[in-house]
Amino acid sequence: MCGTCGCGSDTNGPTILKPGEHNHSHDVHHHNHDGHTHSHEHHTHEDHTHAHNHSHNHKHKVLEIEQDILQNNQVLAARNRGYFEAKNIFALNLVSSPGSGKTSILERTLSDLKNEIPFYVIEGDQQTLNDANRIDVLNIPVIQINTGKGCHLESDIVYEAVKKLEIKNNSILMIENVGNLVCPSMFDLGESKRVVIISTTEGDDKPIKYPDMFHTSDICIINKIDLLPYLNTDIEKLKGYALQVNPKLQFFEVSATTGEGMEAWYNWLKENI
Amino acid sequence: MHELSIVMGIVKIAEDETAKVKENAVAKIELEIGQLAGVELDALNFVWESAVKDSVLEHALKTIIEIPGKAICADCDREFYLNNIFDSCPNCNSNFKGIIQGKELRVKSLEVI
């Protein structure tokens, strides 16, 4: 059974597509990698295992393996991170609830900065090429990952997408995760920084309702500030909750629609490349 | 529901380790799951049965050892237990802390047959 989508076979699994490509290749289904075997090698601990093997009556052997369940994801995330560092690629993992404006922030950022900085984009969604098509019209290299029924991106599928993107040195890679404020928090993709986006319409207590995502992020973008006059949301209260979860969080208050506040975000991006 | 990915990770580990010692099945498996690890045990138990089907874990007895969350305050060095990742220091009320326990997500041991 597939762990990402829960399907019985491989045919429903994640796919990686460029805009214009057709959905016929399933060979990237991400738990088929040879890499798995290699990544477990250094945890074999022959001596350790044997030292603890005590035989029971019916040949029962107890293996004290103490192995991290997400180790495979972490190993491949480290591989991605090394690749990004070597090529001076500033990689951002953009996470949020569905509809908070990730793609709109991306569109605005890319249109405004594409003449200054080379950008690459990986889009994660359960279905459709819609987001990749929105980026593609800006003439930015983009790959769409469709996770099928999966609720988050994992480092191995990002690795496959990165290979396909052929990213140039000294650029910015935007990885737009699946819209979901719970599951993606556990899966390191190898990003340089994690950016959580929350919109003003979502209520000010969201950071403590979904603390894991805010705890693991470096940057918090508060989007749709142009709507504040029409809402009861208290932005200071929202920031207070977010800082309670993660005191190191750095904020940008923006409106992707009007462009308000985007300059500070752009300056931060430029400083980091 | 990322718990399914987690269980598939456990199945993969169990398959690999069982093959390494040339055995066929797992009789017992012990998991260590921190209370701050972001895993809903109800969801994990819910997906377990269908996820382990046809694997070495199909008939395994599962034991989950829950590990409580613990942090050390960055301002006053107090060690304290926490129920939520955003709990502040009970001594000085600071939010700056290092989590030292409770994020575990490990296969502790397997009893193979």
Image: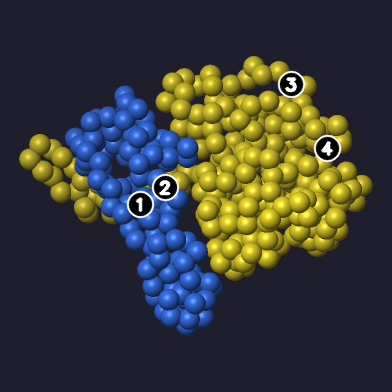
Chain colours: A yellow, B blue
Among numbered discs 2 and 1, the one appearing first in the sequence = 1
Cα separation, mark 3 vs mark 4, equals: 16 Å
- Write down the residue under mark 4: A140
**Label 4 chain ID:** A
Tags 4 and 2 in contact by the CB under 8 Å rule?
Answer: no
Q: Residue at x 53, y 72 (%)?
A: B95
Q: Which residue occupies the foreground of this view, A114 or B41?
A: B41
- Write down the residue under mark 1: B33
* Camera-side mark, 2 or 3: 2
The percent position of residue A240, horizontal first and vertical second, equals 62, 66
Q: Which residue is drawn at 89% across and 48% down?
A: A112
The crowding category of the residue bearing disc 2, from other C-alpha atoms within 10 Å (few below 14, some 14 to 19, many at least 20), is many
Checking the image for residue B39, the label placed there is 2
Residue type marked 4: Ile
- Above/below status of B52 relative to A249: above
Q: Is mark 4 on a helix, strand or loop?
A: loop
Tags 2 and 1 in contact by the CB under 8 Å rule?
Answer: yes
Residue type marked 3: Glu
The single residue placed furthest to the left in the displayed view is A57
